[in-house]
Amino acid sequence: MLTRLSIENYAIIEQLDVEFDSRLNIITGETGAGKSIMLGALALLLGNRSDSSLFKDATHNCVVEGEWQINASLRPLFDELDIPFEEQTIIRRIITPAGKSRVFVNDMPTTVGDLRLLSERLIDVHSQHQNLILSSEDFRQEALDSMAESVQLATEYRTAYQSYRATEQALSELNASIEQIRSEEEWLRHQCDELSAANLRDGEIEELEAEQQQLANADSINEALGVLHEALDNDLNGTLLMLKERRLALSRIESFFPAATELRERLDSIAIELKDIDATAASYLQRIDDNPQRLEEIDNRLDMLYSLCRKHRCEDIAALRQLHAKYEQQLSTIEHSNERQQQLEEELRVARQQAMQLASALHAQRAKVAPQLESEVVAILRSVGIVDAQFCVDIEEVPLRETGADRISFLFSANKGAAVRPIERIASGGELSRVMLALKATLAKRMELPTIIFDEIDTGISGRTASAVGDIIAELAQSMQVIDITHLPQVASKGNRHLLVYKSEGTVQIKALDDKERITEIAAMLSGDNITDAAIDQARNLLNIH
């Protein structure tokens, strides 16, 4: 339950601290006093979006802090969110003037998303506009599942349904892919056959281009190599012959001219290198022939490879081979498509069967508990002044969908003998408020929420009905914490703690009223600014203070 709320620098709230009772807390105040502003600040602790434009002082942070008494049953949720569990849990939300938001739970930084998950288990806020959620089928389904205690089963069904739809989508995509590929199968096979026949090899173009250049210039190459061979190895005046003669001449003078040895050795080295050059040139001369047939073969092969690259828009043979592998993979998919289709079809059958079984179990639980929800809501509606109320839960079986195989409608009639119709179409504002109160009162205990806030849920009612509404809210507060913002003295008198919201010097203030102050406040609610003795007496009677 919420034990304390602190608000700083929010809207027209400068600084506000309020403590709450564990049972029924009544909040009253004139219209515009700031009750809704308090709820807006509390909403920040529930994960609502922040708005820096609501700062009272745009130069300081807005800080909202709440302290909760936490039940140990929530420990697994704290563990899941990686938040330290404390029986006295403090949630703090800080909004900077720049609009940045920071969230702390027990001084541990966390996210707004985690805060929302946590707050869903801590508090339920019901305001007037939420009467419109009666038109939401999601709300009606959640209400019935809470009554049936089938929330866990609904979660299991949703998981199974999502698995079923994912498998269905996978099969649909596979079928579409296969259909498209099959329409191109003949083309794919032709491309694969053509690329396979080409016997592609990485680097082949570069090798062939080099050989093509040699063959195309064979005459020039042979001429250059022949001239070199002739210059080196001519029997009359070749360079090697002349070097041999000079080396012999130097060897003859070595005995009396030692420097000749070094010169002769250097010539020996040069001679060895030149002999090697001559042998290499001679070897090339033997291999490089003018071969028009081979040149034609290379030209044809290169033309074919260039053509394939242009056709498939590939830069080189490596890219062609990658494309070839891709085409082969697509053909393999076609060849194995029946096997994969059968596998997915079987998975789909199993997933659908599982979802159908869970949907059937969910439908049975909902149908079983619907009469109980109807009777409890009708009993409350009659106690709050709709004596001829009829309330029906209509469960229509429909094809599988996210929430099951049911379409749930709440049907209502306030008049005896009148046919029931969807509640959102025929109920007045006051009737909607009472139906929502009846549903909340019926479901609150089963939802195991520690705290519920009613923001003027009693709008549009008065007199005996108002007193009956107060009794229902007070009874609800016997098993959970209730915070009720009200304009009705009959409801306000039921509280265990009465808080008055008012403005002082342009800022929102709040104070807990003692018995004497409560008498005055409820008398003012009864008679307005001119508090009469009769109003005082009636306030005493409502509060049972004499």
Image (cartoon, grey):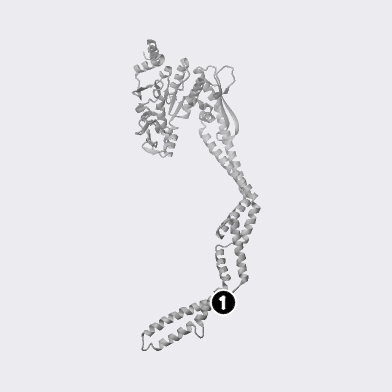
Q: For residue 543, say whether it is visible.
A: no
Side (left or right) of 523 relative to 238:
left
Q: Position of residue 453 (x, y in %)?
A: 43, 26
**Element marked by disc 1:** helix
Q: Residue at x 62, y 71 (%)?
A: 292
Quadrant location of the N terminus in the rendered image: top left
Within the image, what quadrant is residue 522 found in?
top left
Residue 523 sits above or below residue 95 on the image: above
Residue 402 sits above or below residue 258 on the image: above
Name the kind of residue labelled 1 in the image.
Gln
Q: Residue at x 50, y 17 (%)?
A: 385
Residue 2 sits above or below residue 519 on the image: below
Q: Position of residue 68 (x, y in %)?
A: 38, 31
Within the image, what quadrant is residue 54 found in?
top left
Quadrant location of the C terminus in the rendered image: top left
Q: Residue furthest right?
A: 186
Looking at the picture, tell me which residue is in the foreground, 183 or 70. Answer: 183
Q: Which residue is mark 1?
A: 286
